[in-house]
Image: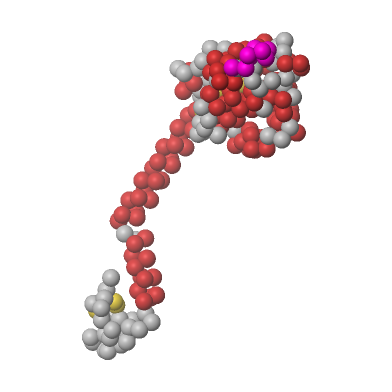
Amino acid sequence: MKKKCPNCQLVNFATAENCLRCAFNFTGTSNFDQSNAKKSFFRSKLFIRGGGLLTAIFIALFGFYLSLIVSAKRLAYDEKKSIERSILILEEKGFGKEVFLLRFLTAYRGTDNWLNVSTREENAYAATNFPFEIMTIYPDFFQYSQDDTERAAILLHEAQHLKGADEKSAYAFVWKNRQQLGWTEASHGRSIIWQHVRKQTRDIVPELFTCKGKEFEDCSE
């Protein structure tokens, strides 16, 4: 970094203490020089190219997000209200982080977007596109759920995917916290979803079902 004399504008060597032309003393002008250096960095080609690249990436991601949104249908009014009631139950039961994601950051859709069409699992109640925070709610979510609490259990599962968790972590979290939610065998043990989720949890997280002598060998009971 060279020193430009603020008095006569002559560019001097960085080690110079006085200007070669007008003998101006450079003591105390380091801040001025650094400020110019910072300005020149922000005007450099590297900075401009980097900014252009980041802008292009942002536009591409936003376009991808919009394509997922517009390629799927919205939920019906009564379906939205059902989702809101289930989120309210999660809030009342103390699942604050999940409620924030579900209420403020999630875009809900009633049909598969173009990406989900090729990856949808059979017998799914909902699906989440991370990190775009788009959740597809399938008809089985409403058809087979016993009540808003059971729908809240499904949303609690999907909320883990909104945070980036894998399937194993999502099943384990819901099963370990079902008592807090109020989704228990006593209240929902005969429902199709309860029995299906318990079977899926045992298949995916077998370490939770190794306690001999307990019903279904469920260690969390």
Q: Is residue 218 left or right of residue 65?
A: right
101 drawn magenta: no
Q: How is the image coloured?
A: secondary structure
**Does the magenta-highlighted stretch encompass residue 215?**
yes
Q: Main secondary structure of the magenta part?
A: loop
What residue is rendered at 23% in x and 87% in y? 21
Q: Is residue 53 above or below residue 27?
A: above
Q: Which residues are magenta?
A: 210-217
Quarter of the picture holding the C terminus: top right
**Image quadrant assignment for residue 147:** top right
Q: Kindly indicate the quadrant of the structure image that contains residue 184.
A: top right
Look at the picture and state if 79 lies above or below 1: above
Determine the residue located farthest toward the bottom in the rendered image. Answer: 23
Of residues 110 and 203, the one nearer the viewer is: 203
Q: Quadrant of the N terminus?
A: bottom left
**From where the camera sits, is residue 72 visible?**
no
Asked whether, in this view, residue 90 is left or right of residue 116, the answer is right
Q: Name the spot of residue 37 as percent of width and height, x first.
A: 34, 68
